[in-house]
Image (cartoon, rainbow, N blue to C red):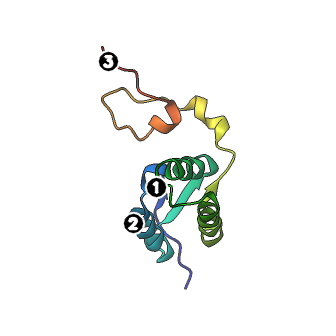
Amino acid sequence: MIHSPRFIAVLDACVLYPVPMRDLLLSLAAAGLYKPKWSALIQDEWTRNLLANRSDITAEQLRRTTTMMNTAFDDANVEGYETFIPALACPTPTTDTCWRPLCGPRPMSS
């Protein structure tokens, strides 16, 4: 039987940073419920912040984690998307913030 997950989800740094959330989402992906996607930029963001906030974790441990993630989900690491970013229309400040990582910080209201 050929099985192809119907759903694709970009796992941003905010869900990869907390270990319980990352483990749950990767377990669900391993079970074939969806296909995870991320970029080297996303991987760098969550590992950099985890290193800054947790002195008990080493850079080598996180390199091993990201390598294992990329090996387990060999098509998850998205590349070559950068050229499309300028064409994306950013939402208004009242809409969902899912585009915020691509569009930059929201302007501060006065």
Q: What is the distance, in whole Å, between disc 3 and disc 2 at their CAs?
A: 34 Å
- Residue reaching furthest front? 55
Please, is residue 43 above or below residue 84 in the view?
A: below
Q: Residue at x 64, y 66 (%)?
A: 64
Q: Amino acid at mark 1?
A: Tyr
Q: Quadrant of the N terminus?
A: bottom right
The answer, for residue 33, to whether it is visible in the render is no
Give residue 81's position: percent from left, percent from top: 64, 43
Give residue 90's position: percent from left, percent from top: 46, 29
Q: Residue at x 43, y 72 (%)?
A: 28
Residue at numbered disc 3: 109
Q: Residue at x 43, y 55 (%)?
A: 15
Quarter of the view holding residue 71 = bottom right
Task: Using a 10 Å C-alpha cutoff, classify the residue at mark 3 as few (fewer than 14 neighbours), some (14 to 19) or many (20 or more).
Answer: few
Q: What is the distance, in whole Å, between disc 3 and disc 1 at their CAs?
A: 28 Å
Q: Are marks 2 and 1 in contact (CB under 8 Å)?
A: no
Q: Nearer the viewer, residue 27 or 92?
A: 27
Give residue 13's position: percent from left, percent from top: 48, 50
Q: Earlier in the sequence, mark 3 or mark 2?
A: 2
Q: Amino acid at mark 2?
A: Pro
Residue at numbered disc 1: 17
Q: Residue at x 60, y 29 (%)?
A: 86
The answer, for residue 62, to whether it is visible in the render is yes
**Considering the numbered disc 1 on the image, is that residue within a helix, a strand or a loop?**
loop
Residue at numbered disc 2: 20
